[in-house]
Structure formats: C-alpha cells, structure tokens
Image: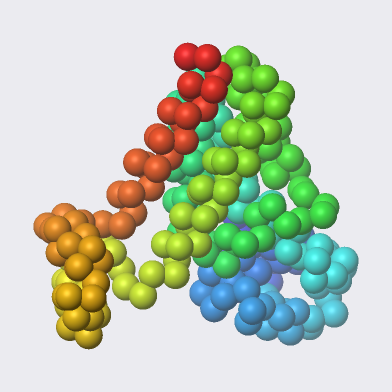
Amino acid sequence: MAERTETIKGTRPPLTRDRVLVAAVELADANGIESLTMRKLGESLGVEAMSLYNHVANKEDLLDGMIDLVFSEIDLPDAGWRTAMRERGISTRKVLKNHRWAIGLMESRRSPGPATLRHHDATIGSLRKGGLSVKLTAHALSALDSYVYGFAMQEAGLPFDSSDAGETAELVDMILGALPADQYPHLRELTIEHVLQPGYDYGKEFEFGLDLILDGLENARGG
C-alpha cells in the first residue's frame, strides 16, 4: 500500500491520489465502507471535499482505487501452481481480515486498477504454466475465489472471536443452553466434541478446505 507522506515542519503534504486512497482505506477499515463519505474523507485529510475531485473522479473511482490498493497487498503467485495457489489463498484471507469491508467488492469493479490486473494475470499465468488447460484454469479461479471470499465473509460474520477460547465457550454454552439435546443431537455432538475442544479456532478450517479444492484440481489436471 502507498505510504503516507510525512508532514515536514508543520506544513501539510500535498494532496495526491495515493494519499486520498490510503486515507479512504483507513476510514473504511476503522468504520466500515458504509460510513465513508467524501466529506468525512476530506476532513480526515484536512481539506474540503471538493478538493478530492482533483484526484478521484467520483465515488466509484474512489472505490476502484481502494480495491486496487487491497489487491496490491496480496502476494503474487511465485511458485509451482499448487503451492502458489495455496499461498495466494492464505495471503488473500489475511488481507481481507485487515480490510473486511472489501470482501464483497473484490470482483465487482468495472474499471480494475493495475494491481488488480497484475494479480489476476499472474494467477492465470501460474495455473497455465502448471499445465492446467484454459477451461480448467477458469474452473480453478471460480472455485478458489468463491471459497476464499466466502470463507472470509463467513469468518467476518461470526458473532465471536473463534481464536478466543473463553469467548467461544461462553457463547456456545449460552446457545446450547437453549437447545434441547433430544431435538438437536448432531448439532450438540459437533459443538461439544469439536468446537469446545482445547485449541479450537474456526480459522483453522480454512486450509483444510483449500487443500480439498487443490486436491480436486490436481486430479482434474491429471496428476
């Protein structure tokens, strides 16, 4: 991500597109994308909202640039196709945990920026160099991205921090207390024998599912 220019001797650094985009991402990270307005963005940069339009054409252009910044944080594939796709998935999930507002916007932009295009081109290139046909590459992208974005969305929507054993146990105990054992035996079994076990963290499910998809692609590729 572009770095903020430091203020020198108390003077305000010049407004640039990079500064505008970085500030917008920071506001969205802190308060959610719904709260991002040109007025609030201008206030955070110490300028009038109208000054922003010298650097972004409109709100859609702002979102295009913000998503491009997010894509720039994801590691580009740089290994054999399977290792590259695994590392890409892990990196994407990590980045989306830092920018949860971006989850539903990653593939929605009609004017993708250079980082977005580089990311997709490198991903496709890695799969093609790995021996996947054009058709299987398209299938792979769909399966991998649906899983990664879907997991990130589900993880962001959890009503508790699954890495916090105390918080998880407290919430689950409260939920189970309202569920009769004779009506929901399988739900209780899974919860008690898996979710409430020491060391449970829902995030650990991610790599298991990712490897299942990669196994399937390996088989489809022909070994």
| Residue at left offset 50%, top offset 62% | 153
For the question of whether residue 133 can be seen, the reply is yes
Q: Nearer the viewer, residue 124 or 181?
A: 181
| Residue at left offset 62%, top offset 62% | 104
| Residue at left offset 28%, top offset 64% | 162
Horizontal and vertical percent position of residue 145: 58, 45
Q: Nearer the viewer, residue 135 or 38?
A: 135
Horizontal and vertical percent position of residue 201: 26, 57
User: For residue 185, which quarter of the picture?
Assistant: bottom left
Judged from this view, the residue extending furthest toward the front is: 182
| Residue at left offset 49%, top offset 41% | 89
Q: From what the image shows, is residue 114 above or below residue 201?
A: above
| 108 lies left or right of 164 | right
User: For residue 13, which quarter of the picture?
Assistant: bottom right
Judged from this view, the residue extending furthest toward the left is: 198
Q: What colour scheme does the image use?
A: rainbow
| 12 lies left or right of 101 | right
| 51 lies left or right of 192 | right
Horizontal and vertical percent position of residue 76: 57, 34
Q: From what the image shows, is residue 124 above or below residue 90?
A: above
Horizontal and vertical percent position of residue 115: 69, 43
| 190 lies left or right of 76 | left
For the question of whether residue 14 can be seen, the reply is no
Q: From what the image shows, is residue 148 above or below residue 129?
A: below
